[in-house]
Image: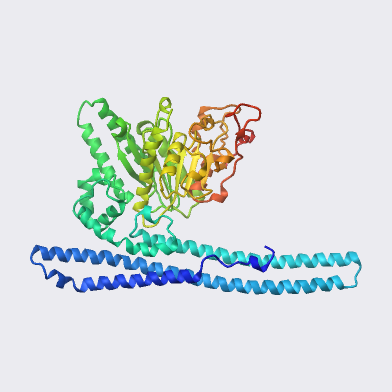
Amino acid sequence: MTGAEALSYPVDAPGAVESAATRSERLAAWVAEVTGTLDRDRDRLAAAWSGPAALSCRQELRLVTGLAGSVVGPLHASGRRLRAHAVVLLEARARVDALRREYDAARDRHRRETEAYAAAELPGPLRRLQLEDQQAAHAAELAGLHARHREVLAEVRASAVRTARGLEAAAAQVLPASARHRLPLEEREADLVATLPLLLAARHAAGVGSVPPPGTPPALVRAWWMVLTADEQDRAVCRSADRLGGLAGLPAAVRSRANEHRLATDIASLRTRGVLTEAEQRWLDTCLVTRRALARVRQERGPATRPRLVAQLLVFEPRAFGGEGRVAVAVGDLDTADHVAFLVPGLGADVRRSLAGLTEDAIRVVTEAGRQAPGAATATVAWIGYDAPRLGDVAGDGAAAAGADLLAGDVLAVQAARDVMPHLTVVGHSYGSTTAGTALRDHVTGTDDAVLVGSPGPNVATARELQVPDGHVFVGASSRDPVSYLDRFGTDPTHEDFGGYRFRAEDVTRHPFRLDGADHAKYFHADTESLVNIVRVVVGDHGAVERALYRHEAWLLPDGINQDPESGRAPTVP
């Protein structure tokens, strides 16, 4: 920065933010007035009916006024937050104006002092030394002014983030996750009121006493659950566990409770059947593996103040995919975690053979996250939620395409039940990176960061095709991992042209001189470069992620033969 013009105002216009605050407060007052009118006239309106119809009318009006009234608080809160941010912007402008005046005064004083030194009758070398000292002092003073300017801008950015999160929390009380993700500030308070008819329709879409059918929009499911009493919720879990466990829009804790009820019921039922068919034995094996995974998580001592880790059974479909099973076990509380990660496995992954190992990976991610970010809560989903292909069936990307739809649905379901959106990361390993890449290419999922490790290709040509923020695609590849060189599905993400951020992922136990299939399975091992850097992404500490050099085509050799600068670097133990 070389002039006062570099001392710029924050881009946000205080007047526009103040106007948005006023609109939010006016909307709150209008909704409150309508709610009060309906509440006062409830008996008069119900008097037009008699008997059960009058009772039903009163109940409907009570529900309507209750739901309408629930919008008033979020609107008032949004108005307060916007008005507070407008004050911060006004104060920032005043401080920038003062800095500009100081800058102009300092520049004029410096010019006068420089001219005086230049005119002084001193020997040439001495005059030059004095001028250099004076110019250094001038530069230090101006640098101090610019540092103060940067502090003003940092405070404005922090206020904007707090305001956005506050509006996100307000909107989350009435909006589905897919509708509210990254909404501009000025749009959110209007959407609160626009969603009111959706909430009022929840009762009529499913009825208070009946479980919404599969495919019901998550916002309606969430509204339906909220109007149930605690007793009605308990009865729904006990009587309809098979339907509640897969219902997007319900809290993860509720889905887990329903799924674990089904799990216990399935095990008890199968064990009373005597001799089991092959399909029934696979079903029982899947149930037992799932139960052991949940128990394994709960016996692990968690980070910070929690004595044991929380385990949640987010998905439980033991007979899916011809008996291979579809299961997702969460390590940590998906309903409250600040950071949520989905681990998507690769070739050959199924519940019976892979859930235990993937759960251990998820435990290590959460444990390392507790070490790196002790003040935040992290939850990681061991997601065996698609029909991963075997090695002989991987010629195409059909499994990735089918799995992408399921992954996107499960990611959105977690958000749909949340009041405040978590920082969300999808981590794809091996062919799981192809599935994750396809999901993030074809669906808006609200994902903040994508991590691709040991990838044979993410089904896109460049990172920009993935629907995550620019610069938030991270790539890990061991120089000894043969799968990461395959370049089978889309562009090799370890090359600079792909546009991802390659991080260090070498292991001290790697093969000393050649490619080794064993190195394809080490990305989540404890105390490795890969695990530490993956977790840095998961907890949002992007600046700490250690950069690795990109691979490049080998000179004078046929296309497709890569050289990896990481192969000559000695791995470290973080």
Picture coordinates of residue 518, whole percent (x, y): 51, 29
Q: Quadrant of residue 560?
A: top right
Which residue is drawn at the image coordinates 15% and 70% (left, top)? 45
Which residue is drawn at the image coordinates 52% and 70% (left, top)? 89
Q: Is residue 540 visible?
A: yes
Q: In this view, does 386 lie above or below 30?
A: above
> Taking 346 as reference, is 552 left or right?
right
Q: In this view, does 541 lie above or below 525?
A: below
> Taking 213 as reference, is 345 left or right?
right
Picture coordinates of residue 21, whole percent (x, y): 42, 70
Q: Which colour scheme is used?
A: rainbow
Q: Which of 285 and 541 is in front in this view?
A: 541
Q: Nearer the viewer, residue 153 or 395?
A: 395
Which quarter of the rendering shows the C terminus?
A: top right
Q: Nearer the viewer, residue 96 or 358?
A: 96
Q: Quadrant of residue 431?
A: top left
The number of numbered badges drawn on the structure is 0
Picture coordinates of residue 188, whole percent (x, y): 40, 62
> Taking 37 as reference, is 514 left or right?
right
Which quarter of the rendering shows the N terminus?
A: bottom right
Picture coordinates of residue 471, whole percent (x, y): 54, 48
Q: Nearer the viewer, residue 391 or 398?
A: 398
Q: Can residue 228 be seen in this view?
A: no
Q: Residue furthest left?
A: 51
Which residue is drawn at the image coordinates 25% and 65% (left, top)? 66
Q: Quadrant of residue 241?
A: top left
